Amino acid sequence: MEPDKDLNPDTNDLPLRANTNHILVRHYVLDLTVHLDRKVISGSVVLFLEPCSGLRTKAEDDIGPGARTLEAGGSRDVSVCRSRDMDTMEDGTKGLGGTTTRMEKMFGASERDGAGFQALSAVGSQNAAETENIQSSHSWETTSDGDFTLVLDCCDLDVSKVEEVDVTSVSSTVASERSDVSSVNPQADFIQNLISVPSSRWRQKHQLFLLCSRAHRAQDGSSLHFQRDRWSLQVRKKGVATPQEFPRALRICYETRPTGGSVRWTKDQDNRVCVYTAGSPINNRALFPCQEPPVAMSTWHATVRAPSECVVLMSGEEQTVPIEDRDTPFLIWNYYVTMPMPASTFTLAVGHWHQVTAEIPPALKRGVRAGAHCSKIAKLGAGPGEWTEADLRSGLVSSISEVVKGSSLKTGSGDQTTRSDSAFCYSSLEDEGLSVTDYSGMVDDGICCSHGDYPCRFTEQSARSQRVIPHRVFGPVCLLQKAQGVLKLLPRCLAAAHTVLGVHPFPRLDVLIVPSGFSSLGMASPHIIFLSQSVLYAGSLGSGENGLSLCGSRMCHEIAHSWFGLVIGARDWTEEWISEGFATYLEDIIWAQAQHLSLQETAEQSDLKALLRWRRLSDELQNSEEALQILRPNMENTGQASESGSSTVKHALNPDKTFMQVHYLKGYCLLRFLASQVGEQQFIDFFRLFVKKYHGQLILSQDFLRMLLVTFPSMERKGLTLSAIYADWLDRPGIPKWLYERSAVWSQTRLVEEVKAEVMSDQLVLLLELLLEEEELSAATVCALQRTYNLQNQDAEVQHRWCELVVKHAYTRAYRDVEHFLVHNQAMGVYLYGELMVQEDPEQQALARRCLSLVTEQMDQSARRVVEEMVL
């Protein structure tokens, strides 16, 4: 394993240390407790391991996609990796011998009467706390260098012990029907057989994993030794020289740190402590030890204990019903996934969230009215005013009795029956004049699933016609009324996405309005979307579609990640454009569909968006280093890893890259270019075919481009070969020639010419950008502009340009608008601090420092470092 000193501090590459070519985690069982008072999460994770049968070679990598990934970004949305099982057993029997039959018999019995698992539960409940020895660095040093080392990605965690789990009690119960079966390593055989159980029996499989996770540590006298360095956790067992001999089930006990890079402790807009996973460049390695390379695909089950007044939201296929933790003031929430996914897709949020409904209950109306001022920093110490705990608990969803109320419903995921909140929304499509059922995705085009075995929604009849999946919206009390706009738009956006792309990859969706320190406009994860308060419309819901444009388009962007970024993603994390470029391109198409625009209106709105993105891209490329402008920075080495499976993500820790949008904007422009070559509608039709073929898999750029070139052979006749596209768009900095030419066309469209008349939000953005190019504007002109367009009350994109204009022309009467923006739109205000400082105006510099002091405790760590470099 490469030491930390091999990392180049000038490039800020992120190491992926896990030796995934040697051994893979196939299932995680997490048991966590959230301590709001100490700002830590403590508990354990049990890893179920499978040694790899052989190393992947470059020749194998060149054959095609290896799996699938989830992507992080938002404005960054979220970087995630996915991969299919590389050694899938055909029909669940290959290499299993008689043990598979034994397990299938047990499963059959449990499906008939449930008795098998009642007996196993009794075994699991015998666990008791034991005194364990914390392994020291000395014990690590006494192990042999010849021993096999399990390497996990890990940082900012305090690991107290690592132990082998003895699954004998569970395996012996399962094996009771076949006492004649013997094995040199029965525990390893049992775990291997459990991993290989087919997806048709996923529920029993998960229950067995859960029982195994509760078993005692192994008592054979041989202990596990571990060592932590900056980026990894390394584990050995003395005398074990190969992955095949290594224990198959490990328990790691640990505690997070308040400043850990994956976990964000802060206060919500109601001034109450909360925590959420940040979707940071290091993903989840500071939440639990895991494997982060994209090929590391696994399922998981998570048990989370949190204070009873809190709501726990998480990636999980069924809406959980929390249960009381006996005599403690905690509730227990259980979530799981059956689709193998990377550990980096695991998403968690714990806080005093409330569910948004169309009508705000009377008990909360007073709090919502007070919420107009709840986010003023001067009043943060005041708490929720005159509210009592009874007021809060009688509100929208703060009462856990309302959270757990529900009825069974089918989500279109095989035998999954979701226990759902009674307030789970399906759609308001009848009110919007839309059909609830759409069979457009049910055409048989001969494309079959090619991913590993899991319960796949793409093969289910019910999922194909489910235009709007069950969905909910959560947020703090003071934002409930504004968040009603999200609830109104969500079913329309979901239905539009289904029309464009087909089957929803996931059976449900929660949307959470995250605290103001969130550094993105949105972040998409399986089953849950984090949304910045910056996209919420400041006006009333009756203000028309224009007022909801930013919220609607952002929602469409995050929903698009369900297909590109989650169910299909980049096999190499440096190819972020595969997630962000696609989501940016698709957000316009889905949002136009949600608005029921005509073809002409769609084209005009699309060209206006393209012009705005071109201007942002052009500006960014003029002010960034060339190394950060390349969509495929690893070029011909993209997708390659070391012999062990470890690799690095180029530039991932570079703070400048964190706030760049090249992979969004240049990736979007590449897709616009490709669409112009084959036709817009034909390009969208191709997207649907691509999704059907590659869902559940990781891809490289070449997989998408090769399929496109095969589907449209006329492209190669025009000289558009794979190497030509690489050369023009992916492997070099700067702007391709086509984009210069096309931007001139976008600049002459009707909507651009109308920017001085009655304007829509995007036109206001363009107007302000044009005015920013003017060297001088009088105070009277700026005042008239503000009065005419009410700029301080427009959406956050408009407000941002307005603040830039105020700073450039030192319009002191509106400095309060700049302060308000920097405090309440932290995801968008980072470089506004730079504008305040570069003017060398003492009043503006004092304003920048004052704003930083107001938000420094709530601010995202990466954003704070960048701002502090500018301001201090």
Image (cartoon, rainbow, N blue to C red):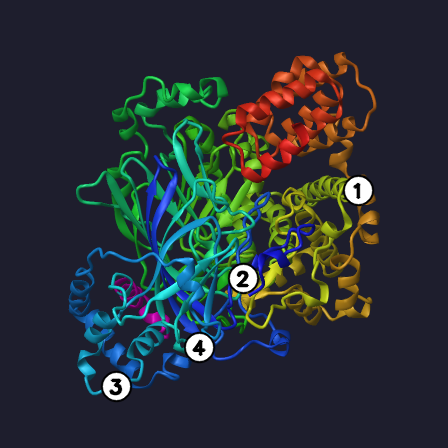
Q: Secondary structure at mark 2?
A: loop
Disc 2 to disc 4, C-alpha distance: 19 Å
Residue bearing the label numbered 3: 182
- The magenta region covers 196-211
Disc 3 to disc 1, C-alpha distance: 69 Å
Q: Which mark is residue 17?
A: 2
Point out the frontmost of discs 2 and 3. Answer: 2
Q: Secondary structure at mark 4?
A: loop
Nearest to the observer: residue 212 or residue 244: 244
Q: Amino acid at mark 3?
A: Ser
The answer to whether mark 3 and mark 4 are in CB contact below 8 A is: no
Q: Which mark is residue 241?
A: 4
Q: Amino acid at mark 4?
A: Ala
Height in image: 97 above or below 788?
Answer: below
Mark found first going from the N terminus, 4 or 1: 4
Mark found first going from the N terminus, 1 or 2: 2
Height in image: 320 above or below 387?
Answer: below
* Rendered-image quadrant of the C terminus: top right
